[in-house]
Amino acid sequence: MAGSAEVLTGANAGHDVPHHDYHLLKPSPWPFVGSLSAGAMLLGAALWMHKGAVGPYLAVIGLLGVLFTMFGWWRDVLRESAAGDHKPVVNRGLRLGMALFITSEVLLFFAFFWAFFHSALEPPTAATAAWPPAGVEPLSPWQIPLLNTLILLLSGVTVTWAHHAVKEGHNRVAFKALLITCVLGAIFTCFQLYEYSHALHEGLTPQAGTFGSTFYIATGFHGFHVFVGTVFLLVCMFRAYALAFSPQKHVGFEAAAWYWHFVDVVWLFLFVCIYVWGGSVSWSVTGP
């Protein structure tokens, strides 16, 4: 009987030890909590836009739930990595997931550019219209937009510096480079907010036809991405200070660096297409 018990114990132990490099996740509350919070945020925002009394409260509760989910889920991913669950094949999957996410973001901004170019190149014929709308003066691309372009290009250099430092095992150097990158991201955001306040004062509002709506949806979403990327890099900065990265394992930092480079490239397209080209296009149509 004792021998049989030992055999059974050994068999059970063998089943507990995985014979592959894939990470089988344990039951997690985050998908359910995250979807419930996102649904509450969406419903609250819709009610808020339609003057619903509970809309603002529901939207804020949903947003807090989404933020809580993000913190808890990413914390668990870091713990799994520290426990050795992220083998090379898992790391490849994480990189692929980030690449697919950035691809979806590219398609999102493609839709914004499509709307802008369609509105600029296909004037309506059934009503009086103009591009830009009457009384709206496009922003000069050679002031704050050019300065923000230089800031983001410089931030791309510093985040690349941090990436090379991490690959060489110099976490302290990466910390300094990421600190500079986060400061540059914060400066960009401040300049864009100042630009928005100036534009709104001068009459360039989201209600200024398709010119105003496409301008704010494209540049505003990019500004949101800059804010998210800055927070992403800020977390990586503290992790670098804690010596959490190694030349072999730094997938989290790679994801943040890829995201930041994506933000840089999108801004170059925004600067050239919307600020420089879009501000130079002018036409007016008077329908019957």
Image (tube, rainbow, N blue to C red):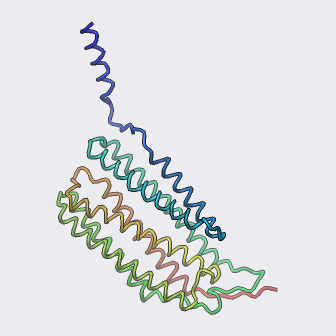
35 or 61, nearer to the observer: 61
Q: Position of residue 169 (x, y in %)?
A: 18, 57
Q: Is residue 66 left or right of residue 250?
A: right
Is 194 situated above or below 62?
Answer: below
Q: Position of residue 272 (x, y in %)?
A: 48, 79
Residue 236 falls in image quadrant: bottom left
Q: Residue at x 40, y 50 (%)?
A: 96
Q: Residue at x 23, y 55 (%)?
A: 245
287 or 185, nearer to the observer: 185
Is 112 situated above or below 28?
Answer: below
Q: Residue at x 38, y 84 (%)?
A: 147
Q: Position of residue 166 (x, y in %)?
A: 22, 59
Q: Position of residue 138 (x, y in %)?
A: 54, 88
| Residue furthest right as drawn | 288
Q: Is residue 67 left or right of residue 117?
A: left
| Residue furthest top as drawn | 1
Quadrant assignment for the C terminus = bottom right
Residue 163 falls in image quadrant: bottom left
Mark count = 0
18 or 11, nearer to the observer: 11
Quadrant assignment for the N terminus = top left
Is 124 situated above or below 262?
Answer: below
Q: Residue at x 53, y 90 (%)?
A: 201
232 or 250, nearer to the observer: 232
